[in-house]
Image (cartoon, rainbow, N blue to C red):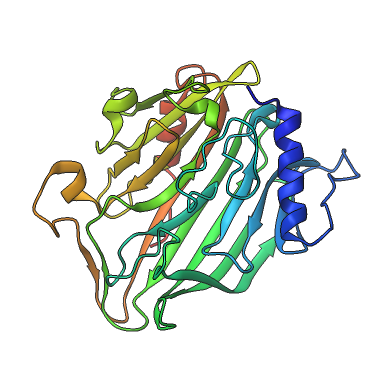
Amino acid sequence: MISRLALLLCSALAISSMNGSRVIAASDDAKTSGVKITEVGDVLRVEINGELFSEYHFKDVSRPFLYPVLGPDEAPLTRNWPMVNAPNEEHDHPHHRSLWYAHGSINGHDFWSEEKGAGKTVHQKFITVKSGEKQGVIQSSNKLVANDGTTVATDERTWTFYNRPDARVFDFAITVHASEGELKFGDTKEGTMAMRLNEVMRLKGKTGHGHIINSEGIKDDETWGKRAAWCDYYAPVDGKVVGVAIFDHPANPRHPTWWHVRDYGLFAANPFGLHDFEKKPIGAGDLVVPAGKSITFHYRFYCHRGDEKEAKVSEEYTAYAKSSVSN
């Protein structure tokens, strides 16, 4: 099992490689309270009460992503590769970059993979970068650019990071605009709101000790392709059980969503893949946004200690479901 210290060292090396020879050091002020967001090199660094939580990578990437993602007690929740090599990690699916949002068919263009011909989500600017005692916010505007250089759509993404003593909690909201004409999210399992988890959280294999459960009580392998309001993935990391749940807000289109959640650590909410998930006719999962209109999705990530019962995931989801969001 990879030690937490080793993984954090790998994280530092990865950050160093993305920023030339410079390694981003931990905060010198361990007593700093609240959520602090600062731009360092090619990333926005997110610290909570003086401790690294994550970094937002947005320059010269296939799509913006968070890496690393550190849970309670600084437990590393996501895989290191392909950002950096680490022992006992599989080198599969190089587009699985820690935590990201992308879809495999938008107007027929692949924004999920990094294969030849795939499109990219290109950061344009930050609308808001705000630190605070109770929460910090990153809001950005982006373009979805096809391989031929054509802009397919635009979006705004908002990350809200909360200062909670008992867990690491953050929200993600995305509004995709059909700014270039009618927009079609195609029917494919390859998407969408996604994480690639720490290798020890796998269900199987030499390092895997994980479990999955969803809001319907369905467990492990059986959760793939099922609809649920939330899904939780947990395992012992560095000797302590930790987990991460993703919540699908009731205001989202097609709530409750389907889950593209795999035994090797892929963890994704996908409201578009009906053909794959339910064996419906090809195209049954297509969702069309008329020209000039937009569509919005809201998700919460709840990084917790213990399994779903100890962490009271269901109660946390109920509270989230009652929160108001704007579409």
For residue 89, which quarter of the picture? top right
Residue 257 falls left or right of residue 276: right
Identified at 64% across, 44% down, the residue is 68
For residue 303, which quarter of the picture? top right
Q: Quadrant of the N terminus?
A: top right
Q: Nearer the viewer, residue 119 or 174?
A: 119
Question: Residue 45: x percent and y percent?
Answer: 73, 54
Q: Nearer the viewer, residue 261 or 250?
A: 261
Residue 38 falls left or right of residue 61: right
Identified at 49% across, 41% down, the residue is 196
For the question of whether residue 35 can be seen, the reply is: no
In the figure, 39 relative to 252: above or below?
Answer: below
For residue 108, which quarter of the picture? bottom left
Residue 325 falls left or right of residue 188: right
Identified at 32% across, 22% down, the residue is 219
In the figure, 285 relative to 98: above or below?
Answer: below
For the question of whether residue 206 can be seen, the reply is: yes
Q: Quadrant of the C terminus?
A: bottom left
Identified at 58% across, 49% down, the residue is 82
Q: Nearer the viewer, residue 39 or 119?
A: 119
Specify the farthest residue to the right: 28
Residue 23 falls left or right of residue 183: right
Question: Residue 40: x percent and y percent?
Answer: 78, 61
Question: Residue 208: x percent and y percent?
Answer: 49, 23
